Amino acid sequence: MEERNVQAKKIGMFLLALSMGMTVLVGGLHHQASASERRLPTSDAEIKMSFSPLVKQTAPSVVNIYTKKVVTSRPANPFMNDPFFNQFFGNRFGGAFGAPRQRVERSLGSGVIVSSDGTIVTNRHVIDGASEIRVVLHDRREFDAKLVGADERTDLAVLKLQDVHDALPTLKLGNSDDVEVGDLVLAIGNPFGVGQTVTSGIVSALARAGVTGQDYQSFIQTDAAINPGNSGGALIDMNGDLIGVNSAIFTKSGGSNGIGFAIPVNMVKVVMRGLISGDLRRPWLGASGQTVTADLARSLELERPGGVLINAIHPNSPARRAGLKAGDVVVAVNGLEVDDPNSLRFRVATLEPKGQAVLTIIRAGRKQDVSVPLEVAPEVPARDETTIKTRSPFAGAKVANVNPALADELGIDTLTTGVIVLDVASNSLARQANLKPGDLITEVNKTRIGSVADLNAVLRKGEKGRNWSVAVKRDGKILTADYTL
């Protein structure tokens, strides 16, 4: 019996060797036909290949970033609410207890040199609030850096090194639309401040969303180890091209769990150009919709789930002028697949606000292309930003008319209309009334509010009274409250 097993193993080994030989032959012939074709390693020599040449080519373009931030805080007076202390001493000790104190916070991260003159792209959260930014190159040279611009909605920032006299090494910006799951990648950064570190892995998934609080999420997921300090570093492909900026990790321990995320370089390109020019603008479709689920796909008689079912269109939008209709299902933008509203927003945001985009839609069961002009969201109606001073539950609140441009800035549905709360002053009646930034004021004293002018008119009419009834929309829910001032 044992001899038979040994014989079976020998036959298996022979067949495996034969198949490997055939694979080498076919792979070699196929390689001649298409040198850029992805393929598995086909020999022991290929398996033992080193990333060293690629690291030597790319690592000099990745930098370490160190920041300093001065934080001012005012400690609370421990006797502030003691009536007996106040009765005898008043506020004579208020300064001693409540004097502002300053402390210095230091943080670190990574960045990528994208221009030989010292232009660097990194994550916004790496340099947020920094009073000093110091950059250390791969060759240990150090430079001060100034912030060119930052975009909170994508968590990207651009820095410029000061007093650069020599051309610096740069990374070529690749095309993240060409990235596929399974591609080999390298992550380069400064984890935990230990110094530049290179890790390898594969692309684990594409178009990941719900990872951070940013508006435009379509992350490249990788199992290459990414740790705190890697933020702003490079994710590169096997051509040595930048395909993403490392941004976040999924972890319960504070270290890498093999789930890291990078902002695709195609988004980086658009944001970087806008920040450098000082005019970061994004295209606006003026249409909203929902994900086509399996149930929706069956009811619409579609072949499979996926895409965005359009359910609302702004009356003065590019989508309306292009002929898009409620009930259309958007499945691609410029030939690139769209699975849900988030991926639709991302695809459009990676385009410049000029020219046209081709949307592939399904209408009445038939697939067709629609050309949509790429325009910025309009400032109509005027925002009319106002801080309410009338004695009312809104006193101390800064409000504005919502238009598509403001809605886009705030990251809310660009079809939203009405009056929104932008800010609430501390120690104000609005703060006491529990109003919050982002609240949409829908009704005051049984009167519907459609504009700042409507709100001011109602407040003037009711300012002599003491009783107020208010309705606001918060997180999709209508909240009502009655106040007596």
Image (cartoon, rainbow, N blue to C red):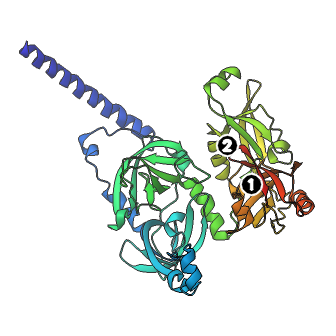
Residue 31 found in image quarter: top left
Q: Amino acid at mark 2?
A: Asn
Taking the image as shown, residue 451 lies to the left or right of residue 123, namely right
Mark 1 is surrounded, within 10 Å at the Cα level, by few (under 14), some (14 to 19) or many (20 or more) other residues, namely some
Taking the image as shown, residue 245 lies to the left or right of residue 423, namely left
The quadrant in which the C terminus is found is: bottom right
Q: Which residue is located at x 76 percent, y 32 percent? A: 328
Residue 370 found in image quarter: top right
Mark 1 vs mark 2, foreground winner is 1
Residue under numbered circle 2:
334
Residue under numbered circle 1:
407
> In whole angstroms, how far apart are the C-alphas of marks 1 and 2?
25 Å
Taking the image as shown, residue 262 lies to the left or right of residue 148, namely left
Name the secondary structure under disc 2. loop
Name the secondary structure under disc 1. helix
Considering every residue shown, the one lying at the far top of the view is 1
Q: Is residue 355 above or below residue 110?
A: above
The quadrant in which the N terminus is found is: top left
Q: Which residue is located at x 77 percent, y 56 percent? A: 420
